[in-house]
Image: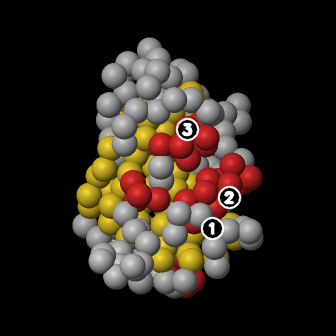
Amino acid sequence: MVVAVATTMMTVFAACGGDSNGEGEKTAPSGATAASESNAAAPTASTTSTAVTAASGSGSGTPSRKPCDLLSKRIAEDALGVPVAAPTQVPGPGNETCNYRATDTSVTAMVYLTTYTAKGTTAALDQAAAQFKNAYAVSGVGDAARVSIDEHAIGVLKGDFVFAVGLIPPTKGQTITPVTEAQMVKLANAVLAGL
């Protein structure tokens, strides 16, 4: 069965959005890439001048800010509730993404984390969040966070470090399984625990 999955990550938070089919269900977004049973399409990454975070403190005793160091297999499996394959790392201009997918190729399930190389600010987080459908501020994670349930993404600012996490729960068919604010906050806090 072919399942459409969003594959573009933009600005501060990763997007896996879509349109409503008129019945209140999420459907595959326009411009999505079809993922067949191989479930192998990895997200691509792009940024604008508002993409923000601090660089890793390589060799300085500072914790790593590499996405696959922060988003572990355990975190991915806890968030998705299914076993995941080895991560895929996707470099981009000014960012890096770590992507985990379900090992069961009959199900589309993905969690991804994008980190950025520029320093972050609340203003830049707000500017990026404005680009996403129904994004709003949430508390209980980092110094500031903006979530878009419609886009399955959360952007988080901690100090001058900003990252984006996206979650597509196990999905079969063309309808994307919804996420909740609580799921997104829990996932973002699991990533923050690695800092």
**In whole angstroms, how far apart are the C-alphas of marks 1 and 3?**
23 Å
Residue 154, image x, y percentages: 58, 60
| Res 33 → quadrant | top left
Residue in the picture at 48% in, 43% down: 73
Residue in the picture at 25% in, 67% down: 93
Query: Is label 2 in a helix, a strand or a loop?
Result: helix
| Res 118 → quadrant | bottom left
Q: Is residue 58 left or right of residue 149?
A: left
3 vs 42, nearest the viewer: 42
Q: Is residue 2 left or right of residue 145?
A: left
Query: Is label 3 in a helix, a strand or a loop?
Result: helix
Label 3 neighbour load within 10 Å: few <14, some 14-19, many 20+ = some
Residue 151, image x, y percentages: 57, 51
| Res 27 → quadrant | top right
103 vs 137, nearest the viewer: 103
Say if residue 36 shows up in the picture: yes
- Specify the label residue 146 is tagged with: 1
Disc 3 marks a residue whose amino acid type is Glu
In this view, the mark in front (1 or 3): 3
User: Label 2 belongs to which residue?
Assistant: 185
Residue 106, image x, y percentages: 47, 17
- Specify the label residue 178 is tagged with: none
Label 2 neighbour load within 10 Å: few <14, some 14-19, many 20+ = many
Label located before the other in sequence (1 or 3)? 3
**In whole angstroms, how far apart are the C-alphas of marks 2 and 1?**
10 Å
Residue in the picture at 57% in, 69% down: 156
Label located before the other in sequence (2 or 1)? 1
User: Label 3 belongs to which residue?
Assistant: 77
